[in-house]
Amino acid sequence: MEAKLETQQVKSVNFARKFRWTVVIWLLIGGIINYLDRANLSIAAPEMMKELGLTATDIGLLGTVFSWSYAVMQLPSGWLIDRFGTKKVYTIALIWWSGATMLTGAVHKMTTFIAARVLLGIGEAPCFPTMAKITSYWFPKKERGLATGIWDSSSKWGPAIAPPLLVFIMVTFGWRALFYITGALGIVFAIGFYIFYKNPDQSRKLSQMELEYIRSDGAGSEQNIQTSKIKWRELFKYRSVWGMILGFFCTIWIWNIFLVFLPLFLTNVHGVSLKELGIYAGIPWLGGIFGNIFGGYLTKKLVDKNVTSPIKAKRILISISAICAAFVVCAVPFVEGLAVTLALLTLALCFISAMTGSAWALAGDIAPPSMVASVGAIQNFGGYFGGAFSPVVAGMIVDSTGSYSLAFISGGVIAGCAALCYWFIVNKPIEN
């Protein structure tokens, strides 16, 4: 009896030590909803083009205006998060972008579609900088790569789940229902997050032992973090910040091509039907999920075994993944057969996702603790402001050449350049 009681106590202590991972699950779910609200356009695109007479360039333009508004709003969103806190900003952002998603389902003209996508970009901008900031509160530096890899995998879970789920909704209720349902889901989640989330030192479900562990390597909460002497605008003076901006631009360029055009590529080039699209369009994103989580795990192991520092571990992973992604993406147009194509697309997203996860985690290592959201948002600004061109450029290439080959080859080359940026430019943290 005593042995059984002792075993239960041990299990209780072990669970208490791991409550921080529950926070990651909430971030993961929020990120999935975020990407469902982005991916619904790519799923609805074939039906929208038929019903409203839109072209591939039009769909690319909708992807571009979202990216531009999303990118521009990164700059104020990072400052707002650092200034007013994660909980308030994230909840408001969730409700905003969910409303914009529902609005997309109600409009009929290209101009109003553009307006709805602009509003979506504004609302979604604080999402991932908030997650980076929350991670800096809840996790010591050696665990941030893995924690970030888990919640950043939401950007692959969303597109992976979207095809079967959203195609079913579209076939059953029509393409407009995609936007209504995913928007309503976000509002429900926003309410749940507001009720659940507290910073570590305010959480009643967190044991003192785990709180001390979290605080042991610079984490904690707003109250425990010393305000940086560096002003926000001065962040642009640092070499590492510019390396992150340029490197993420190279990453998001190819990322946006996959996000916007993957379903159309499978439909137009490989003859995948609408019903089959629900299965095949989700397969490559499974590789992205693996790349995110395994990449984060790998960087943690490199640090745990004292092979290298947290910063260098992430730079190594990003650089190697960028080179591998370049070769794989460039090979896509030269293979034949759906199975081989899906294998290459899956492998490409595995490498690209390892890059995005480690890049977000890198913000927590490069930035002063009080400016993690700002540096993460600035990096994301560079990625999406520059990467915003890729959907419309790819759409123009497809419309003018009737082929996706040049879009993939140019995207692969640009992705490979991320290795140069993160390895040679991002080399030391910002010092107060």
Image (cartoon, rainbow, N blue to C red):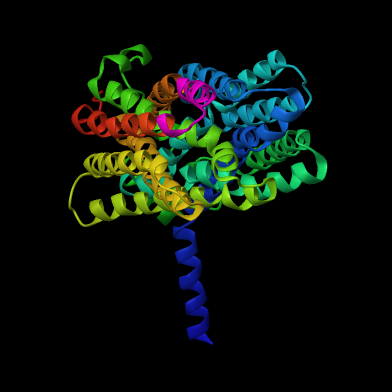
The magenta stretch is 389-406
Q: Quadrant of the C terminus?
A: top left
Asked whether 317 or 263 is in front, the reply is 263
State yes or no: residue 356 in magenta. Answer: no
Q: Which image quadrant is residue 260 in?
A: top right
Q: Residue at x 32, y 28 (%)?
A: 247
Count the marks: how many? Answer: 0
Asked whether 320 or 73 is in front, the reply is 320
Asked whether 124 or 350 is in front, the reply is 350
Q: Position of residue 67 (x, y in %)?
A: 52, 23
Q: Position of residue 378 (x, y in %)?
A: 40, 22
State yes or no: residue 396 in magenta. Answer: yes
Q: Which image quadrant is residue 177 in?
A: top right
Q: Is residue 380 left or right of residue 242?
A: right
Q: Which image quadrant is residue 119 in?
A: top right
Q: Position of residue 98 (x, y in %)?
A: 68, 31
Q: Using the image, determine if residue 391 lies above or below residue 281.
A: above
Q: Residue at x 23, y 25 (%)?
A: 431
Asked whether 161 or 362 is in front, the reply is 161
